[in-house]
Amino acid sequence: MGKTIAAAEFQAKCLRIINDMSEDGEAVTITNRGRPVALLSPVRPAREVRSIIGAMEGSVLAYDDPFLPATGPADRGSTP
């Protein structure tokens, strides 16, 4: 569930609490007079965004004639 801490204690120790949270990855619920008022959670690292340019590099093993259709007659079905 995570840690729970009073707002006054969070105010006094916020930098240490944030550093601890970044190490253990555990969210912290901040309370005021026993009632939860805020939830502090660690930021998850964003996935690396790759460029679309070059994404298919190395996926074509052989390409003999660039003017031939990409599919064969069996792939196209039975069209007249």
Image (cartoon, helix red, strand yellow):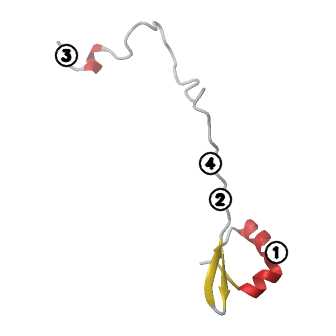
In terms of sequence position, does the residue under pointer 2 or pointer 3 come before the other? Answer: 2
Quadrant of residue 29 within the rendered picture: bottom right
Q: CA distance from mark 1 to mark 3?
A: 71 Å
In terms of sequence position, does the residue under pointer 1 or pointer 4 come before the other? Answer: 1
Q: Are marks 2 and 3 in contact (CB under 8 Å)?
A: no
| Amino acid type of the residue that numbered disc 2 sits on in the rendered structure | Arg
In terms of sequence position, does the residue under pointer 3 or pointer 4 come before the other? Answer: 4
Is 76 above or below relative to 31? above
- Nearest the viewer among 69 and 62 is 69
Q: Secondary structure at mark 1?
A: helix
| Amino acid type of the residue that numbered disc 1 sits on in the rendered structure | Arg
Pointer 3 local density, CA inside 10 Å: few below 14, some 14–19, many at least 20 = few
Quadrant of the rendering where the C terminus is positioned = top left
In terms of sequence position, does the residue under pointer 2 or pointer 1 come before the other? Answer: 1
Circle 3 residue: 79
The residue located at (82%, 83%) in the rendering is 12
Q: CA distance from mark 2 to mark 3?
A: 52 Å
Position of residue 69 in the picture relative to residue 20 (left or right):
left
Residue 16, which numbered label?
1
| Amino acid type of the residue that numbered disc 4 sits on in the rendered structure | Arg
* Residue 54 position within the rendered picture, expressed as x and y whole percent measured from the top left: 60, 26
Circle 2 residue: 44
The residue located at (27%, 19%) in the rendering is 76
Q: CA distance from mark 2 to mark 1?
A: 19 Å
Pointer 2 local density, CA inside 10 Å: few below 14, some 14–19, many at least 20 = few
